[in-house]
Amino acid sequence: MSKQEDGTTGPDVPAESGSIFDRAKPEPRQGHDDGPERLGTPPHQTDSAREGSTVLLAEPGERSAAVPPAHAEEIDRRAERRAERLVAFWFMVSIVGTIGFVVTNFVGDKHAEYYTPCMGTALGLAMGGIGFGVILWAKRLMPHEEAVQERHPFASSDAEIAATEETVALGFADTGLARRPLLRRTMLGAGTVLGALLVVPLLNLTNRKPGAQLKHSHWVKGARLVNGEGNPVRVGDIAIGGIETVFPAVPVTEADGSVRFEPQLSLHEKADSVTILIRLAPGENRPRPGRENWAYDGHVAYSKICTHAGCPVSLYEAQTHHLLCPCHQSVFNVLDGCRAIFGPASRSLPQLAIGIDDDGYFIARDGDYTEPVGPAFWERP
Amino acid sequence: MSDMTASLGAARASTHRRRRSSAVVLLLALAATGVLWTAFAPRGTAQSTPDANEAVRQGRALYLQGCSSCHGLNAQGTGQAPSLIGVGAAAVDFQVSTGRMPLAAPGAQAKRKDPVYSQTQIDQLAAYVDSLGGGPKQAVVTRNALDDADLAQGGELYRANCAQCHQAVGAGAPLTYGKYAPDLSKATPSQIIEAMRTGPESMPVFGPGQIDDASAVAIAKYVRFVTEAPSAGGSTLGKYGPVPEGLLAWLAGIGGLLAVCMWIGARQKV
């Protein structure tokens, strides 16, 4: 646009043919230049900017007030034909696209990888061709005029205002609110009580505490470690360098005294008790003080729930013994009590003390985790 | 006397008969033993032992030439590379057939590339390393086993055990410090199972105690299924999911629409 302003873009248009542009000037422009009522895009500020427009010159018959020189008209006719051909080209593209769409639909292999992209491209050409053609038609072949529409005043007429006031007053009188104090008071009371509802959500924030449910999981003393299918895990199932996600199967004593193990595999049971059982090579584990006998034969068990945001920490790198959380890249060192060594998590993963029962299956030896699993919360000790 | 001679003659004759019959029995027994030997002789061992030894010998020659500079002359390992004693034939087959070994350059992780050795040479190397001490055997996945495998079960096991690192459709994903879980689209079923059994590099081991052989084949079948599934929508953008797809939609899609809008609204230039 700035190019047009210096008058260089229409080199073949003589500057003296400016009189033809008078029609393009918006009529109400005089006296409204700074008026707030003006809608639409403000017109160009300089007349020289409009001189670049060949479109206006392309309609000389309608604007016979001043006929431009003959050679300029000839040039404009050529530009017009060029624009016509361009618009027609896009319409042809649309036809080709439509034919391509139909042909692909019937001939193309619907299971081939190219099928959907071809259909999309063809349909895009079919619709886009018409769109581009129409827009180019409007831009290149139609006269460019800038119209200014006056906005009607927003205020209603005095008569309308008076009529509305009268209607409202009449309606109020019809309710009889002024002379029916019982209705007035009960209605006000109902409104007030309803308004008090707004306070209830705030009360909900204050009087419901999670209690102890965040502080314990479904692990109990003697619960077997079972895999996702509910099968108990025993020594030798997991190779050195292996990892298994385990859940508790709690012992239930039957009426005849036999003990049955009930896998806790519902989603809300899994959610806090999911645990990873990792088998390290003998001597690799460096237990923390007081946890020397929490591992069994190189097997260590840690909560699978990240202490940062509660994602499942399951990316185990068997060489470095790092556990990586996929959500925010927290890294825990398994050999060092699953201490957080990188990323946003700051607490170690809680460790579960494990042993084996008489049948050789892994069990939670001491019961639940000794600390709450998962992310921090306000009441966390 | 005549009686005596007769009886003597009879006795001598019977002795002769006994001797003759025992000789026949002996001959028959010998013949039967020979027939039985030819029928039941463990000829397989008699014939394959030299072959197996030959494979180990050839494998050792290849090993000394191509591997020993890092893994040591007796595969005992050096400061640069781990010991190969007890890693098993599966580890050799996986590492060499995926081109990870011989290592192109030291780094965070060995990259998959075209294998340097032929399958025969790989088998010989595997035989040599296997002869050093036991370990997982090479995985042989037949077409029938793949056809019979349970695809849905493989999918469940894959999502439970593999997807956290290798991504939902086996496209791979980064780990820490430059390591990564590789893209599985080029892995053959036997390579997938060998990787599970041996736990190459960062990967944990998934032994037969956790995932039995049929389930391992099912996982391999699922991996082939998801990595070979045709992409109906054109380019997969690496199958990395919503992040690259959203990036493309916002930058190219919305950006392109904005450009068209600006073009429609722009003033005619001439």
Image (tube, coloured by chain):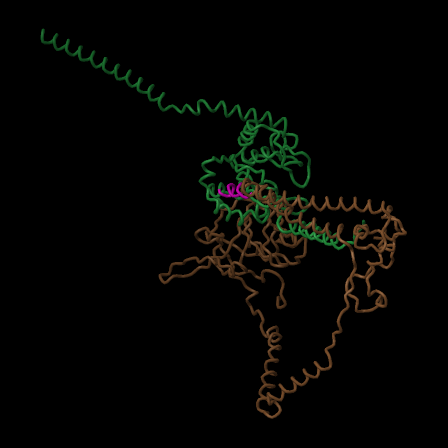
Q: Residue A318's spot in the image, x, y percent?
A: 60, 45
- Seen in the image, is A89 located left or right of residue B47? right
Q: Residue B244's spot in the image, x, y percent?
A: 66, 49
Q: Residue at x 57, y 65 (%)?
A: A214
Residue A124 vertical placement versus B87 (above, below): below
Residue furthest out toward the right:
A16
Q: Residue B37's spot in the image, x, y percent?
A: 35, 21
Answer whether residue B222 is magenta in the image.
yes
Q: Residue at x 63, y 63 (%)?
A: A376
Q: Which quadrant is the C terminus of chain A positioned in? A: bottom right
Residue A161 vertical placement versus B34 (above, below): below
Q: Which residues are magenta?
A: B218-226
- Residue A318 visible in the shown view: no
From the image, state the color of chain B: green
Residue B14, by quadrant, is top left
Which chain did the renderer colour brown? A
Residue B212 vertical placement versus A25 (above, below): above
Considering depth in this image, is A229 or A58 the residue closer to the camera?
A: A58
Considering depth in this image, is A226 or A51 the residue closer to the camera?
A: A51
What secondary structure predominates along the stretch shown in magenta? helix
Considering depth in this image, is A303 or A193 the residue closer to the camera?
A: A193
Answer whether residue A344 is magenta in the image.
no
Q: Residue B262's spot in the image, x, y percent?
A: 75, 54
Q: Residue at x 57, y 34 (%)?
A: B92
Residue A155, by quadrant, is bottom right
Mark count: 0
Residue furthest out toward the bottom:
A179
